[in-house]
Amino acid sequence: MELRQRIGSATCLFLVTTLLLFGSAGNAQVHRSASGTGDALILPYWTTSNGNDSLLSIRNDSERAVALKLLWLDEEGGLVYSFNLYLNGRSMWTGATVESVRLGENTSPNPSVNHLYQSNACLLPLDLNVNPEDEVDFFEIGAPRGSLEIIEMASVDPASALAPEGRWIDCPNLAARFETGAWSSDLAVDLRPPAGRMSATIQLINVAVGGMNTIEATALAGFSDSVQHTAPLDYTPDLSHASDTGADAGGVRSLVCAHGDCRVDEWSLPIKAVAAALTASALVTDYSVNPGLAAQFEWFLHRPLYRYQASIPELQIDSAPLISFFTREGEQYVVCPPEDSCIVFPLPDQPVPGTSEFDFELEPSLHVIALSHAFEPLVNISPLLGHPIEQLVRVPRFSSSNPEALNEGILRLRFDQQETSLTAPAGHRYLGEPVIAFGIQQFSNGTLVDAAGGSVLANYRGTETPRYHRTIVEPD
């Protein structure tokens, strides 16, 4: 008999915290951090499109200075840029992705990262840093939108001469350590394992429409308990490089909780431990497309491990998502017979009456579901963030007697129907797939009056965080 265990995003916080507080320092059990801090961070989206800029903030809450690898990915999951960030203890580095930059004679028409001079941080390669006299500079990023992986490679003891009291030596001297100094022969010299106190956010800002959304990074704690410091132009470590020196069999352990039981599995492939921590069987979110509020909603889905499946065949996880609509009262939309004039969003095949869940094909790495009442067959970008899409999802009429019931409601996306799922050595299966999501909700009105007495359109944006569910199936 199958035992199905389901949890939401906040379940087992007490148990996870207890394990972390009383576990030994060598217990690098990869898990999704409830506090938002960890040693591997995933920002699901950044963009320079449709008038949007993305303000990135990376924070180090440890007293130790840290060495980070930043991996910028495009919307297909391809690597477009990477560099090392050396960040002081108890400090923050910020930068912004913008569509183009004009700084006096130094300009670029291409998507770029624009950043200020920050004395508490060093970027390598050295030419990425801002001259203090210039105050601000930029470097081209190589894509208009994508996601970001932030991996803590190492930290430094506050008593070390390399970063006394949590402050790195100056940037030129750090660069020299790679060329002729200690790191030219041993990249781990004077370094300690990650401190694991990193967090990050992206703020998607559209000044013209007055919109701003804050997206918190998904943090993995217990990702690594060893030094993984690499040269600036090296594209590793990445999410496939979890490290667990305390594992009995030499693999990497994952920690996943379900209904009061916290399960530890050891995986021979490190990335499978990461997959276990990130796998969701279903996502649920609220939405509104109420015409009276000029409401618009976009739901972004990021599959952070998709890019590794080509190089790691053992990671293959099928995706067979099903989407369904619910009213605010909890009534599920079901396809009505044609004579009732019910409609549903465009599908390759017209669903038969009685259908309540609909197949939905996801893009490889980033996908957006944009809800609308006015379906436009030729639409190729989402209205709010300008992400490429094939078509808008036309919200169906709930019934001929209540056509507006689905103006506001609940969306549910299931991933637990795939043929191939992540299976632990003990035989239990993690149904679903590794996925991260967020929603952008916008409302508008025309009731404000400007100085000339005219009506002004005002926009209000909010970020919807979905509810995550997990399903673990015990072996027969």
Image (tube, grey):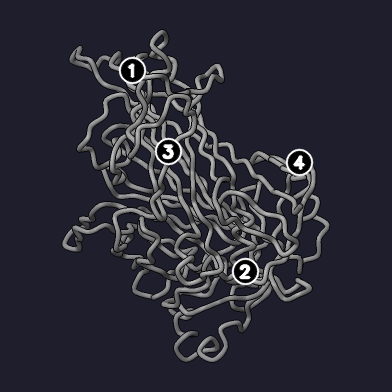
Q: Is residue 197 visible?
A: no
Q: Are marks 4 and 3 in contact (CB under 8 Å)?
A: no
- Amino acid found under the numbered disc labelled 2: Pro
Report which residue position mark 1 lands on: 291
Disc 4 designates what residue?
Answer: 259
Q: How many marks?
A: 4
Circle 4: residue type: His
| Circle 3 residues within 10 Å: few <14, some 14–19, many ≥20 | many
Label 1 CA crowd tier, 10 Å (few <14, some 14–19, many 20+): some
- Residue 286 in percent (x, y) is at 50, 28
SS type, badge 2: helix
Q: Amino acid at mark 1?
A: Pro
> How far is the residue under mark 1 from the one under mark 3?
18 Å
Judged from the image, the secondary structure of the residue bearing numbered disc 4 is loop
Q: Mark 3 or mark 2: which comes first in sequence?
A: 2
Q: Secondary structure at mark 1?
A: helix
Q: Quadrant of the N terminus?
A: top right
Q: Position of residue 278 (x, y in %)?
A: 59, 53
Q: Is residue 414 left or right of residue 444?
A: right
Q: CA distance from mark 4 to mark 1?
A: 40 Å
Q: In front: mark 4 or mark 1?
A: 4
For disc 2, the marked residue is 270
Judging from the image, what secondary structure is the residue with disc 3 in? strand
